[in-house]
């Protein structure tokens, strides 16, 4: 299981403030803590000011790289911001994200192809997020048609089936799990990811929903997630799920984490 640390996101109040005030120490601290907690990539989202986004994203990249060597997941649909940020990164970044929306196919996909970066691909098009599994798969088939034409390997792609909150549809979890299973059987090479906390928007006791959602999704074939690597509940659920799904040879990861105190609540 790979973790994309979610915390450096300009839609969060405190991060927006740090970007605005150029409070580099705050961003560096978030980067260091997520890296130490086991993030494989650090998501960088500069927020929603299109005119300021390129310089804000570069500033985020520079501060993340001052704190850690972890690769960055550039969370933007703005080709201008992506182009300049790619010049600033020391390691090949992940791009978050492409989709079947024309502006992303025209603006972001060529960047992924030119720089051979891993990329998250959303199962949506200009009409939005399809309701049914079959319609999401059709979007994914269409996207793979485009990426394969450009020589992008299937295993460069992290498909995001887009978890919708359980608060607005009690079958949203089931649709999500069955979409994962179908992607896994039809396209065995691709990776599957998601924004983990989407499932519980508007619900109480969100941590508990997110934790079980993670476990069920991993059983269906999820192999990465955009989440908070410092979250104790998520981390322990991930370790136990990997153990039970034969993703932890000789139980090493689990027992090592236990010895390091990962299961002790502080
Ligand atoms: N798919 C893809 N990318 C994504 C998402 C997705 N990027 C953004 C988002 N969704 C995932 N990232 C975050 C980042 C932070 C928080 C949630 C998702 C977060 N939320 C707090 C909470 O839920 O309680 C509230 C905000 C705050 O702390 O201020 O921290 O789905 N490809």
Image (cartoon, helix red, strand yellow):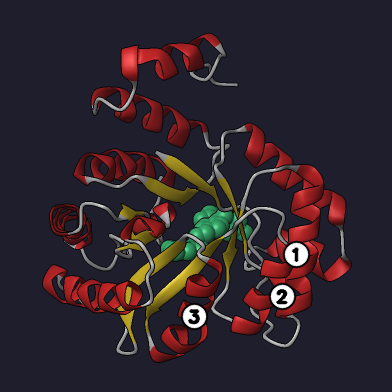
Crowd tier of the residue under label 2, counting other residues whose Cα lies within 10 Å: few below 14, some 14–19, many 20 or above:
some
Whether residue 194 appears in this view of the structure is no
Query: Where, quadrant-wise, is the C terminus in this rendering?
Result: top right
In terms of depth relative to the viewer, which is nearer, 95 or 44?
A: 95
Say whether disc 3 or disc 1 marks the residue closer to the N-terminus: 1
Relative to 114, residue 219 above or below: above
Residue tagged 3:
110
Percent x, y for residue 71? 62, 50
Indicate left or right for 15 with 109 as reference: right
> Residue placed at 71% from the left, 78% from the top?
53
- Indicate the secondary structure of the residue bearing disc 3: helix
Outermost residue, front direction? 151
- Which residue is under mark 1? 88
Confirm whether residue 90 shows in the render. Answer: yes
* In this picture, residue 266 sits left or right of residue 125: right
Query: Where on the picture, by quarter, is residue 197?
Result: bottom left
Secondary structure state at the residue bearing disc 2 = helix
């Amino acid at each position: 299981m790979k973790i994309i640390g979610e915390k450096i996101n300009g839609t969060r109040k405190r991060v927006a403030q740090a970007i605005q005030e150029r409070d580099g120490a705050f961003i560096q601290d978030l980067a260091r803590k997520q890296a130490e907690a086991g993030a494989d990539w650090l998501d960088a989202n500069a927020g929603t000011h299109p005119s300021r986004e390129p310089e804000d994203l570069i500033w985020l990249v520079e501060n993340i790289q001052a704190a850690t060597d972890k690769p960055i997941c550039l969370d933007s649909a703005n080709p201008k911001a992506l182009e300049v940020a790619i010049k600033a990164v020391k390691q090949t970044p992940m791009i978050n994200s492409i989709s079947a929306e024309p502006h992303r196919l025209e603006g972001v996909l060529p960047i992924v192809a030119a720089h051979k970066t891993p990329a998250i691909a959303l199962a949506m098009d200009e009409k939005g997020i399809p309701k049914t599994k079959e319609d999401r798969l059709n979007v994914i088939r269409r996207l793979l048609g485009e990426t394969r034409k450009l020589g992008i390997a299937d295993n460069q792609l992290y498909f995001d089936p887009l978890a919708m909150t359980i608060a607005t549809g009690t079958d949203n979890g089931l649709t999500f799990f069955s979409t994962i299973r179908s992607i896994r059987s039809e396209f065995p090479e691709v990776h599957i990811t998601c924004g983990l906390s989407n499932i519980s928007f508007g619900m109480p006791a969100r941590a508990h929903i997110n934790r079980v959602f993670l476990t069920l999704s991993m059983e269906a074939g999820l192999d990465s997630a955009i989440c908070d690597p410092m979250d104790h509940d998520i981390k322990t659920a991930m370790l136990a799920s990997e153990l039970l799904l034969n993703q932890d040879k000789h139980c090493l990861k689990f027992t090592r984490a236990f010895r390091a105190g990962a299961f002790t609540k502080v």
